[in-house]
Amino acid sequence: MRTNSMDNLVVLKTAFFNRDPRRVARSLLGKLLIRKNPHGILAGRIVETEAYLGEGDAAAHSAAGRTPRNAVLFGPPGYAYVYFIYGNHYCLNVSCLPDGIAGGVLFRAMEPVAGVEQMAEARGIEKKSDLNEVSLLRKISSGPGRLCEAMGVTRARDNAKNFVSPGSDLQLTDDGYRVRNVTVTPRIGIVKSAGQLLRYFIAESSFVSRR
DNA sequence: GAGGAGATCGTCT
DNA sequence: GACGATCTCCTCT
């Protein structure tokens, strides 16, 4: 699976995110997550997501109501919600549904597409390694914490950032890639509401975090 | 290759 | 003071 070209990228609009997180999570598969920085462009194709439904979803951060930490999830759609977990890692989400209603989608894994060397370096992967090997490419962004480290995503830098704004250095775009088969499973690493099928991934992708 | 444990800290109770 | 939407390293098989 390779990208088409980096031309003809259409930035996803607010309306795309102003929907049920389950629909957004599925629709985001195959889209490109892009980070613009002074050294160039980093991009990855989203291959795995999870939907978090808001106050009715016991596993969601918004389950207990609005707090300073999770306020973005209750805000307008299309904004980055970044949180710190396990003392080591950040996780990146995008808010869904209209202002006042909580909901979001977690980015769990992506396939590196552009700026691969930069991302590998950010992850502490030796440059001398052959970055064309799938087994090494997988280590760059096959997991929510890994993805954030590769993209340089932190709460201080990116929380509450607008994905939709033209000037944003963090964007979600459509390059015309079409996903064929989507697999749906329970979400990973949660205890509450563990039975719900809210994890989505591209069936044929090698860059999914876990099978 | 599978399984277990440690790292490490912000957030909420 | 407890815990968590994770990752890596180490040990054992």
Image (tube, coloured by chain):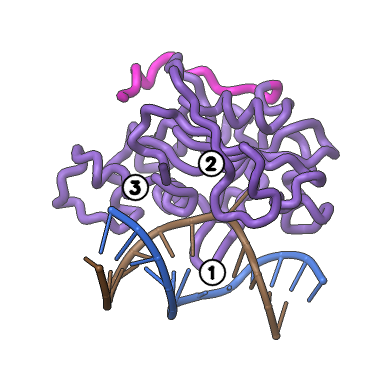
Chain colours: A purple, B blue, C brown
Task: Indicate the position of residue A207 as horizontal and vertical percent values.
Answer: 36, 38
Instruction: Give the vertical position of B2 relative to A112 (above or below).
Output: below
Q: Is residue A99 magenta?
A: no
Q: CA distance from mark 1 to mark 2?
A: 19 Å
Crowd rating for badge 1 (residues with CA inside 10 Å; few <14, some 14–19, many 20+): few
Q: Which residue is mark 3?
A: A140
Side of A21 where A7 appears, left or right: left
Q: Is residue A10 magenta?
A: yes
Determine the image quadrant of residue A209.
top left
Residues in magenta, as a range:
A1-15
The structure residue drawn at horizontal position 49% and vertical position 30%, both measured from the top left corner, is: A183
The one nearer the camera, A123 or A107, is A107
Crowd rating for badge 3 (residues with CA inside 10 Å; few <14, some 14–19, many 20+): many
The kind of residue tagged 2 is: Phe
User: What is the chain letter for disc 1?
Assistant: A
User: What is the chain letter for disc 2?
Assistant: A
Q: CA distance from mark 2 to mark 3?
A: 14 Å
Q: Which residue is mark 1?
A: A87
Q: Secondary structure at mark 2?
A: strand
Instruction: Give the vertical position of A21 relative to A10 (above or below).
Output: below
The kind of residue tagged 1 is: Gly
The structure residue drawn at horizontal position 78% and vertical position 41%, both measured from the top left corner, is: A102
The one nearer the camera, C10 or A164, is C10
Q: Are marks 3 and 1 on the same chain?
A: yes
The one nearer the camera, A42 or A187, is A187
Q: Main secondary structure of the magenta part?
A: loop
- Residue A107's disc is 2
Instruction: Give the vertical position of A29 relative to A83 (above or below).
Output: above
Side of A91 where A206 appears, left or right: left
